[in-house]
Each structure stands twice: as C-alpha cells, then as structure tokens.
Image: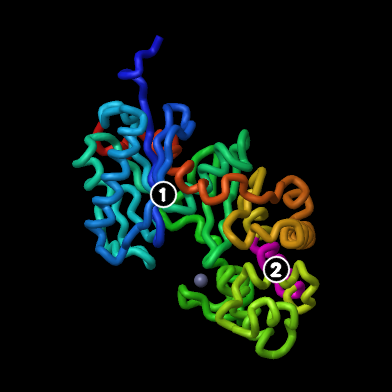
Amino acid sequence: MITPAKQRFAIGVDLGGTKVASAIADAEGHILSKHTFPTGGEDGAEAVMDRIKAGIRQLLEDVDASPAQLIGIGVGSPGPLDTRRGVVVFAPNLPFRNVPVTDILQQEFHVPVFLENDANAAGLGEARLGAGQGRRHVVYITVSTGIGGGIIIDGRIYRGAHDFAGEIGHMTIEPGGPVCGCGNRGCLEAVASGTAMARDGRSMMIAGRTPILAQLVEQDPEKVNAETVAQAAQQGDEGCRELVERTGYYLGLGVANVANLLDPEMIIIGGGVAKMGEPLFARVRQVLSQRALAAVASAVEVVPAALGGDAGVIGAVQVALGQDREPAAVATR
Ligand SMILES: [Zn+2]
C-alpha cells in the first residue's frame, strides 16, 4: 500500500493573456483538481507570478500534499520563450519581458520546473490524452485569433534548434496576400485565422454580400467575428459560406504542406475556428487529398481537438511529468 504521504503529484499551469488555468494531477497525469483565475496582466509580471504561486499552494492544499511530493511543475506560456533557461522573453498579451519563470517557481517550491510554448503544451496534451491518444507522430494546429502549432515526433515535442519550431501560422500560403502580424504577407495566420475571417466578413458585409450576417450583427461591423460568420453560414448566408469554404481551403493548403513535410499519423485542429466542425473539416480534407502526395494524404487523419480549452493545462501537466525532456534539462532536483 502506498501511503498518501508518499504519493507523487504534478502541477500544470497554462498561462494566458486573460486567464490562467492550473491543475494538479497524480503521477499518471490524471487531473485531481483544477482552478482558473484572471491573469491580471495590468498589475505587472510580479503580481501575475504571485498569483500563480498562490494558485499552486491552493492546488497542494486541495489534495493535502506538500511541495516535496511534487514530481515537477510545467508551465505553458505564449512566447517567444527560452525553454532551456526557463525564461519568457516576450509575450504580446502579457507584461512579461525576460521573466525567469522557472527560477521564480523553483525558488518557491524547490522542485523541477519546466517552461513550454503554450501551443506545444496543448499539442502534447492532445497527442497523449486527447484526440491523438495512442499515436506517436502528431501535429496540433490551433486556429483562433492567431494560428499556432505543436509538433509531436515520436511522442515528444519537436522544438527545433532555437525553440522556434512549429510556427505553422507563419508559413506562406498566399504570396501576395494580406500583411501578417509578423510583417510577412499571406501567412496562414493572415488568411485563415479567426481574425482573418472577421476582417473578410466585415468587408463583405460592408459590400452588401452577406445579408444574413448583417441581420445577425444588426449591421454593426464591430460585431463581426469568426463565430458570427460561422453562424450566418449555417443559416444559409452565401457570402459567409464562401468565407468558411475559403478558410477551409487555406487551412487545407497548410495541412497538406505539414503532411508532406512530416508524415504524421494525425493532424489535430483545435481553437475557436475549429468549432465550425464538418463544413470546415470536409474542405480541409478535400484540399489535403488534392495537394499532398497521394500516399501521404491517404495515411494521415485530420480530426478536431478533443480536450477543448483544457488542452493547455493537461499538456502542462505532461510537461511537468518530465517525460518529454532529456534529464540534462532538469536544473535542480
Ligand atoms: Zn506571419
């Protein structure tokens, strides 16, 4: 019999621009308790880190455990990051500039802490415990405001030489296309993200091409977003249907490129835009079969994500369990 005092736990923290999700799990990664609280980025990085520490103490209390029983803490964060040093270099929606997240939490709890790109963490969660369960080679694409990616090769996150791998949102899809946040033109993110759908839906509405959408948002272009476009398409708005179709086309091009390059078993698409479901996925699969090598296209499954908003925190727990890192990356134990 294992006495409760000897039981081991892992904590995952999914740090986002508006909210933080944190969870404690047993040594197999089963979530035992989970909390979500506002990030409060306007109070500065130190205040956010204090909130994360308090959240971790609360989780330990929830299961009546001490920090000494922790296998580790995994933190998923928007980047760019330096995962080897455990530093959030910069995060567009957070007041974080060169914040040594790993050191701060290690000094507080004296356990190994791992920092991971949020899309990589979510991808690991989906690959291990979500839609990709049982598969070793999985690519996760999250399509919401922006487009992010996580590449899981042989069960582990592929980070590249400098932690920048998996930037699927910035592959060029339409060379002369709209300007992307990164400065390039026609990135996947610039043509197929929720932001791109909202932008195109708005201009189509102003041009009078989306009557059902116009009614749905009471003629207010500000209210046009990916969700209202999808809703209007569902209600038969021809212009919005065309827009969903086009989004699926561009995503399909991205998916075909990824499939040709990596030959994964499965490509999982998550994020708000993926909630459009079959009309979008059917188009993505069709373009995949037209554009990827026949052998590649027929061997890869393209499926919706299964963990929803929990993918990030479930993946962060997997990061905490440390199975994804070389032992050399463990700073202190
Ligand atoms: Zn870009």
Dot label at residue 231: 2
* Quarter that holds the N terminus: top left
Res. 134 visible in picture: yes
Question: Which stretch appears magenta?
Answer: 241-254
Mark closest to the chain's N terminus, 2 or 1: 1
Question: Is residue 251 part of the magenta span, yes or no?
Answer: yes
Amino acid type at mark 2: Gln
Identify the residue at horizontal 32%, vertical 36% (top origin). 328
Identify the residue at horizontal 74%, vertical 45% (top origin). 299
**SS label for mark 2:** helix
Instruction: Provide the residue designation for mark 1.
Output: 36
Res. 322 visible in picture: no
For residue 236, side relative to residue 28 (left or right): right
Q: To which quarter of the image does residue 190 belong? A: bottom right
Distance of mark 2 from mark 1, alpha carbons? 28 Å
Q: To which quarter of the image does residue 24 belong? A: top left
Expressed as whole percent of the image width and height from the top left, the position of residue 55 reads 31, 44
**Hey, which residue is sitting farthest bottom in the picture?**
207
Expressed as whole percent of the image width and height from the top left, the position of residue 322 reads 39, 35
